[in-house]
Amino acid sequence: MNSIKKNIQDTYTKEYLALNKRNDGRQLMDFRDASLNLNTIHTADGSAAVKIGNTAVICGIKAELGVPKSETPDIGYLLVNVELPSLCSKKIRPGIPCDEAMQITSFLNEVCNNCKILDLQQLCISVDKLVWVLSCDIYCLNYDGSVLDACLIALLSALQTVKIPEVKYDKETEETNVIENYIPLKINSLPVSSTFGVFNEKYILADPTEEEEQLCVSKLTVVTNGSLLFSLHKPGGEFIKDGQIQNCIRQAQNRTKTIHKLIKAAQ
Amino acid sequence: MPTNVYRIQGPDGTIPYQQYLINKSNDALVDIATGLMKDVRCDGRDISTHRNLCIKTGIVTQAKGSAYLECGGTKLICSVFDPKEVPNKVEYAKTGELQCEFKFATFSCRQRRGYTRDSEERQLCNELRRALEPAICRGEFANFEIHINVLVLENDGSVLATAITAAGLALMDGCIPMYDVIVATSLGIYKNKILVDPTYDEEILCLSRADGEENRGTVMLAYMKNLQQITEFAQNGSMDVNMFPEYVQTLINQNCKLYKMVISAARKDVIEYFENETQE
């Protein structure tokens, strides 16, 4: 079976897609099971590990004190970076971050700004002098498709676990005192992203694996929190119809509900 | 400050808030030191017991072989890829090459780490490569290279020893021909006390500057049990020469215990593999 698969990958895939079946036994619009683990890293101030099928990512957040930007003196920093280390896939070479890592990084930062996940004013300690800098680093441990979905879940659940201590700052003496009274962050909304792979105009696959991503001509990403749509992204590739996009949004909303349940259950 | 165009960066000169709680962490170190004098360790272990291990192989499905190893608080993941040709190489090499990558996740230590490889990571990477080279049948894949990647998720002491054991497991999982199973343990020496598998705090204590002629430091030894060969030995700090045989003996005994655990994990994998095979 494996040699057939390798030689005529495309025809083979088309044949089973016509039967509404996928390589791993799922139907076309089925998502893989997700699992979530909170507070896995004790050296970080907040952390979460997410697994979707075989895809695994881990997010750790470090809180530090820094000086705010002069144009926005009363808000803190939320810095999201995605790392795809060479350990997670054979395609990625060690060294500078690959294009895909940077793409996911900028997408996540955009989503964070659009959805106002966090009220950045709560990170302010003293205006123009001292604010919190939250560095959120997401490492992909196993690259098996739909990494962006996993990254967003990991980021949000890790942010919910962050507890920052109370800080007293004296403006005149510039003295900083940290009091060990830890306060959790307030999260405003919980956007969830769902990725769909567009195989051709006929077949759209939910939550594609790495193998399917290779075969698909383009991807469609929907970010929603159940009621509001935050981002819908389909960069080029094969054309699709209006109805198909509507269907994808509906599926994404269902997916959002399951993920919200998962996040609630983990706490 | 060089700007990093590849990542989103915050302001320069951020301070971890733990800096303001430094008195507390110093007190904690003093507590550990007084505890050690009474043979009591901070996590309630005996002075010569290894921390509990959690071994899982084959967790990175995209790699040829992989292993996740948890040793107390130290958590790391290692993956190994197929031997492949060395790009842009003209000369013929009789033995295969090892390419190692050793990375700390930015949140893995108390202080936040940078994205680029620092000198500590480079040194650990080199030590890892040298420890593994004698264990792998490099003649089997002449002119090729193997990539070994280690990512430390949480650092709670004895990182290098744990990394070597994990890499040995990942190589086994990836079916790379090896002469023997390779395991490693580290020791912390503090005022004639021999601490097996020190934690991060204990390592700091052992590497702090000694006043007078006290024995202080860390020792790490990588060992192949069946061949009875030492592949890597690393010692830091200052210690009495006459104590050396005792340290090596303790390390070898510990490695023999570790070997049994690693072998039983490997055996379980083989049994699982054949069970799946017969089901299909």
Image (tube, coloured by chain):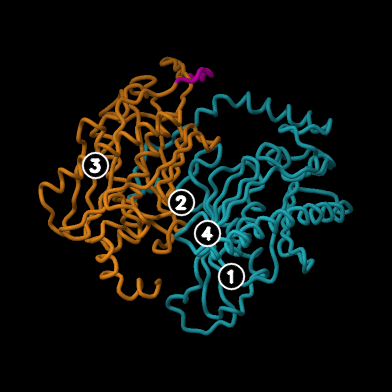
Chain colours: A orange, B cyan
Q: Position of residue A255 (x, y in %)?
A: 30, 39
Cα–Cα span, label 3 and label 2: 27 Å
Within 10 Å of the Cα at label 2, are there few (<14), some (14-19), or many (20+) other Cα atoms?
Answer: many
Q: What element does badge 1 sit on?
A: loop
Query: Mark 2 and mark 4, same subunit?
Result: no
Q: Mark 1–mark 4 contact, CB under 8 Å?
A: no
Q: Position of residue B35 (x, y in %)?
A: 78, 29
Q: Badge 3 is on which residue?
A: A251
User: Compared with residue B226, is residue B204 higher up or lower down, i.e. above or below?
Assistant: above
> What label does residue A141 carry, if any?
2
Circle nearer the viewer, 3 or 2: 3
Magenta segment: does it hold A88?
no
Note whether A267 is above or below B205 in the view shown.
above
Give the mark nearest the N terminus, 3 or 2.
2
Q: Which residues are magenta?
A: A175-183
- Residue denoted by label 4: B79
Residue B129 x %, y %: 61, 64
Q: In the image shown, does B111 or B99 lie closer to the viewer? A: B99
Q: Secondary structure at mark 3?
A: helix
